[in-house]
Image (cartoon, rainbow, N blue to C red):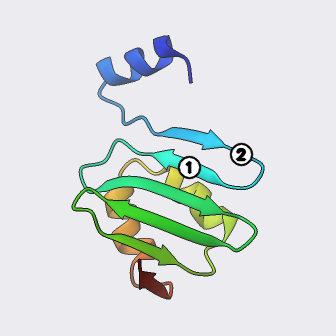
Amino acid sequence: MSDLFTALARVLGLKVAEVEDDDEFFQMLPDSEAIQEAIYDPDTKSLTIEFVTGGQYIYDDVSRQRFAAFKNSASKGRYFVHRIRENYAYSRI
């Protein structure tokens, strides 16, 4: 994402998520008060969430479409609470 786009989005008050697209996984550093980092592995369909409080959880069987919707949501924390947290099996790491 270009620095100009990021600066413009911030001036307009838009949330900007940094996403690194790798052939093996997607890493996202969202602009979120609750979520520090999200890593999605399409091969295992696992979503690892690290919270700003330090807790880390792996959510199982998360579809690529669900991750894309999470990634593109206006509020990552709200999307996580309503669409991921209680809808997928998880384990704390």
Callout 2, which amino acid?
Asp
Q: Residue furthest front?
A: 93
Label pair 2/1, CB-CB below 8 angstroms:
yes
**Residue at x-position 41% and y-position 45%:** 30
The residue lying toward the viewer, choosing from 10 and 50, is 50
The relative height of residue 7 versus residue 83 in the rendered view (above or below) is above
Disc number at residue 3?
none
Q: Is residue 47 left or right of residue 56?
A: right
Q: Quadrant of residue 34?
A: bottom left
**At x 74% / y 55%, what residue is drawn?**
24
Quadrant location of the C terminus? bottom left
Identify whether 80 is placed above or below 30.
below
> Which structural element holds mark 1?
strand
Residue 10 in picture, x, y percent from top left: 33, 23
For residue 55, above or below residue 91: above
- Which of the two residues, 2 or 22, is positioned nearer the viewer here? 22
The residue at which mark 2 appears reads as: 22
Q: What residue sits 40% from the left and 23% below the top? A: 9
Q: Residues within 10 Å of mark 1 (few under 14, many from 20)?
A: some
Mark 1, residue position? 27
In this rendering, the answer to whether 13 lies above or below 73 is above
Q: Is residue 8 left or right of residue 18?
A: left
| Left or right, 5 with reference to 67 | left
Q: Earlier in the sequence, mark 2 or mark 1?
A: 2
User: Can you give x and y, in whole percent of width and height, for residue 45 in the image?
Assistant: 67, 72
Find residue 72 and report its horizontal and vertical position in percent.
52, 48
